[in-house]
Image (tube, rainbow, N blue to C red):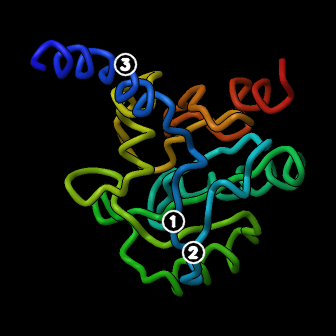
Amino acid sequence: MKTTIFLAAIFALPIIATAQDSLKFYDFKATTIDGKEFDFSTLKGKKVLIVNTASKCGFTPQYKDLEDLYKKYGGDKFVIIGFPANNFLWQEPGTNDTIKAFCTRNYGVTFQMMSKISVKGDSMPPLYKWLTKKSENGVMDAPVSWNFQKFMISESGHLVGMVPPKQKPNCDTIVNWIEGK
């Protein structure tokens, strides 16, 4: 009996590890800036750029670059999703309504914005734990270092890279990835 349990436990370990390793972007949901549930599985087959944003940051003008990128490439094959966060020097103090109004009025943002979240610490949502921890995504550790860090998700729902906040959204790394170069 002990041998049977031992063998069952040994054979179950790879199944458990495989289940964790196979977690994909499509397994997550979030709340939009308008308060509606958004299921990331609706984005299957598209490249997705995830960006944590802030309205009072030196990098805030990247909203324009993000919108330009979205207008050029967005649609059936590529989307951008912004996650406002107030983790760095309180540079996103607004409510979802004020953030949405700011983005629309100042940058004409039409890409999907989500509800404000925390991208660091204990209150980080499961998606950002997956994006930032190799133990979750199987690719890399990429803790968020500042506002406007960009994560690239493949059409198959896997994390494929990260671009630091200082690099603009229209940098060669992101454009070449979108264009498949």
Q: Nearer the viewer, residue 36 or 144?
A: 36
Residue holding disc 3: 14
Q: Is residue 35 left or right of residue 112?
A: left
Q: Is residue 103 above or below residue 167?
A: below
Gap between marks 1 and 2 measured at Cα: 6 Å
Q: Determine whether the residue tagged by mark 1 lies in a helix, strand or loop.
A: strand
Q: Is residue 138 left or right of residue 170?
A: left
Residue holding disc 1: 30
Gap between marks 3 and 2 measured at Cα: 33 Å
| Disc on the earlier residue, 1 or 2 | 1
Say which residue appears at 38% left-offset and 52% top-offset: 126
| Disc on the earlier residue, 1 or 3 | 3
User: Tag 3: residue type?
Assistant: Pro
Q: Is residue 119 above or below residue 8?
A: below
Q: Nearer the viewer, residue 142 or 3?
A: 3
Say which residue appears at 76% left-offset and 69% top-offset: 110
Q: Residue furthest left?
A: 2
Q: Is residue 109 left or right of residue 61?
A: right
Question: Marks 1 and 2: CB-CB under 8 Å?
Answer: yes
Q: Position of residue 143 (x, y in %)?
A: 34, 36
Instruction: Give neighbour class at mark 3: few <14, some 14-19, many 20+ (Cα, 10 Å).
Output: few
Q: Determine whether the residue tagged by mark 3 lies in a helix, strand or loop.
A: helix
Q: Nearer the viewer, residue 110 or 58?
A: 110
Q: Position of residue 26 (x, y in %)?
A: 60, 48
Question: Marks 1 and 3: CB-CB under 8 Å?
Answer: no
User: Tag 2: residue type?
Assistant: Glu
Q: Determine whether the residue tagged by mark 2 lies in a helix, strand or loop.
A: strand
- Closer mark to the observer between disc 1 and disc 3: 3
Say which residue appears at 30% left-offset and 21% top-offset: 13
Residue holding disc 2: 37
